[in-house]
Image (cartoon, grey):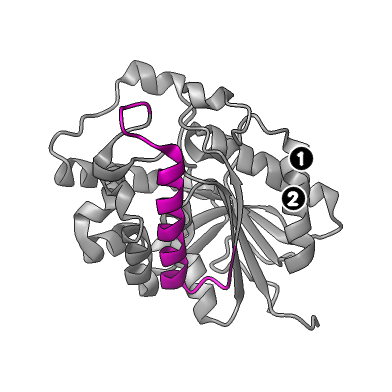
């Protein structure tokens, strides 16, 4: 038995990432009395500015965007009842191929071992029983998501901790439903060019490769409201267009791949803390 609360640590790249893939588990486990720790690696400065101004356009001020997004992140954490927020505050690297990737202070350019040492310090402080982040491709190839995976793996190697570790993912069976919903709520949306898709890593996994399916439908309202707290990025958050009920129908189960385990909990599982309580 342990003499501290069971702890979930989610390592995310930007403000608003916490809500999309893990908002449900963060809210659910907080409601169950589990301590939740969110680590946000970048300041989100490559997000939209006031009025939807894009990075690189006149009037886009990364520092001002970062300050606003920190306020929104605090609001999202309040909605999800996150116990502890830790921010590493690296500069947002932007999408793959942007010039901001090469900025010396960007998360993408920061040596992995340097960032990992900071994360390892947080892991030693909180001693998480479960750690969640992205897969090696950052789910869809975003450099900061990839870097979050890299520093999480490296940080765990720097500690003697042996938490259950999960990558976020999406079942391929849900992709068609997602595409249909995109067409319904965004008439201007078009199918990606097949040639471009062929060059990109596939998103999500076959259903049989997903180890963990967590029902978070009871917390769909909190998850939706947490996303809505990031109002400055509303133009980029497609899910807000569909309303809470349809959102919960589409996003009411969060899925993961278990990549490290010391409990021998049977698979598939429906609880990140299976074998720990």
- Quarter of the image where one finds residue 226: bottom left
**Magenta region:** 56-85
**Residue nearer the viewer, 126 or 274:** 126
**Decide: marks 1, 2 in contact (CB < 8 A)?**
yes
Q: Residue at x 76, y 43 (%)?
A: 154
Classify residue 85 as left or right of residue 261: left
Relative image position of residue 78 (x, y in whole percent): 45, 71
Q: Residue at x 61, y 36 (%)?
A: 107
**Residue nearer the viewer, 169 or 85:** 85
The quadrant of the rendering that contains the N terminus is bottom right
Main SS class of the magenta portion in the image? helix
Relative image position of residue 195 (x, y in whole percent): 35, 16
Classify residue 11 as left or right of residue 255: right
Q: Residue 45: in sight, yes or no?
A: no
Q: Residue at x 62, y 43 (%)?
A: 148
Q: Residue 165: in sight, yes or no?
A: yes
User: What crowding class fits label 1: few (fewer than 14 Cα within 10 Å), some (14-19), or many (20 or more)?
Assistant: few
Residue under circle 2? 118
Relative image position of residue 130 (x, y in whole percent): 67, 63
Residue occupying the far left of the picture:
187
The label on residue 183 is none
Residue under circle 1? 114
Classify residue 274 as left or right of residue 67: right
């Amino acid at each position: 038995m342990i003499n501290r609360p069971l702890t979930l640590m989610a390592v995310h790249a930007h403000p608003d990432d916490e809500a999309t893939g893990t908002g449900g588990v963060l809210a659910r486990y907080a409601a169950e009395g589990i301590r939740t720790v969110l680590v946000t690696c970048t300041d989100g400065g490559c997000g939209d500015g006031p009025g939807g101004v894009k990075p690189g356009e006149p009037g886009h001020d990364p520092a001002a965007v970062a300050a606003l997004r920190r306020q929104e992140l605090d609001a999202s954490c309040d909605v999800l009842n996150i116990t502890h927020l830790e921010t590493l505050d690296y500069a947002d690297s932007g999408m793959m191929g942007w010039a901001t990737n090469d900025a010396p202070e960007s998360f993408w350019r920061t040596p992995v071992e340097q960032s990992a040492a900071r994360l390892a310090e947080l892991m030693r402080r909180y001693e998480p029983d479960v750690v969640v982040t992205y897969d090696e491709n950052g789910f869809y190839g975003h450099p900061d998501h990839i870097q979050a995976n890299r520093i999480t793996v490296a940080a765990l190697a720097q500690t003697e901790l042996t938490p259950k570790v999960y990558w976020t993912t999406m079942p391929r069976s849900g992709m068609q439903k997602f595409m249909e919903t995109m067409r319904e709520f965004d008439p201007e949306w078009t199918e990606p060019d097949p040639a471009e898709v062929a060059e990109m890593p596939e998103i999500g996994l076959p259903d049989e490769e997903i180890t963990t399916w967590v029902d978070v439908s009871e917390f769909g309202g909190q998850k939706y409201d947490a996303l809505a707290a990031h109002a400055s990025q509303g133009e980029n958050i497609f899910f807000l267009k569909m309303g809470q009920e349809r959102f919960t129908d589409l996003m009411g189960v969060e899925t993961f791949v278990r990549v490290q385990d010391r409990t021998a909990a049977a698979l598939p599982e429906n609880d990140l803390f299976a074998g720990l309580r």
